[in-house]
Image: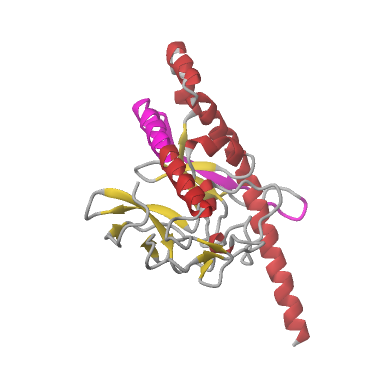
Amino acid sequence: METTQSAGQISGNVLFYNSPEPLNREQHAKLALVHKDKPYAFAAAGTAVPLTVSEFGPAALTFPVIFAGEDRVPLAVMGLNNAENLFISADGSVEPNVYIPAYIRRYPFVLANDDTQDRLIVCIDRGSELLSEQGQTPLFDAKGEPTEYTQQCIKFCDDFELERRRTDSFIALLKELDLFELKKATFQPQDETGAAAGEPVTVAEYYGVSEEKLNKLSAEKLKELQENGALAQIYAHLVSLLGWDRLVNKTMMRQVEAETAAAAAANLN
């Protein structure tokens, strides 16, 4: 894995990374990490965040874990409205006891494709507020070598890449078994008495594992899925779908809070 080479041509758009640059000992010699008690402000607009398969279990305790697009990319759904994260606030604070996906924790580091040499290189988001020449933890030492902090971040990115490849294999297996189906998340509006009011409203469409198809697999195939760990991750995904109600409730509460604040502000005027 290349880490401190001269800048190559990197490709691809990466969520949260506005100005990715290959990590370079000359260009970034004076950069340092800025210590913040609430470092996750960059993710406050992250409605859905990529997950690796090993994260399904802990993520399922907080968010719906879904699959999106032709590639069936696993995502943690952290909000229902565009550019809204119900668990990470604009000031970077995180709701207590919420799992933070590794995709967020690796920031501002990331691995990216270098088209010129067909390789992965370590990059940083040069526009990140977490990096500054006035920061507290340097990226490079006086000899121009990556500091222990930087080495740890690079290892985290390497480990994330390994998990991403494991995730690709997991998705390929589910596709091979034809276990995916299109699903809908809905909620039922209620009147003041708690009775159903109108038709159910669709809040999301996504791909998920079909329980019907899963139950039709042979005992031999189910045993194979159990032994390779895939079955546990499938069940974690299915259990996580109970979290749609939580997202709906949190969205409605946030809307009420916004309306109350707006009314209070109007009264002051």
Q: Is residue 146 above or below residue 64?
A: below
State the image coordinates of residue 117 (x, y, percent, origin top left): 22, 51
Looking at the image, the residue that sits furthest to the front is 143
Q: Nearer the viewer, residue 124 or 164?
A: 124
Question: Most extreme residue toward the bottom, as rendered?
Answer: 269
Dividing the picture into quadrants, the one containing residue 36 is: bottom right
| Region rendered in magenta | 164-193
Residue 20 in sight from this viewpoint: yes
Q: Residue at x 52, y 58 (%)?
A: 46
Residue 181 is inside the magenta segment = yes
Nearer to us in this view, 105 or 177: 105
Direction left: furthest residue: 116
Whether residue 83 sits left or right of residue 29 in the image: it is right
Answer whether residue 189 is visible to the viewer in this image.
Answer: no
Q: Quadrant of residue 92?
A: bottom right
- Please provide percent x and percent y for residue 66: 49, 42
Number of numbered discs overlaid on the protein picture = 0
Q: Residue at x 49, y 44 (%)?
A: 51
Residue 49 is left or right of residue 164, and the answer is: right
Name the residue rendered at 54%, 26% in the picture.
232
Image location of residue 127, percent across then percent down: 45, 69
Quadrant the C terminus occupies: bottom right
Looking at the image, is 227 positioned above or below residue 51?
above
Q: Residue at x 54, y 51 (%)?
A: 105
Residue 200 is covered by the magenta coloring:
no
Query: Residue 7: percent from the left, percent from the top?
Result: 30, 62
Q: Judge by depth and name the residue closer to the eye, 64 or 130.
A: 130
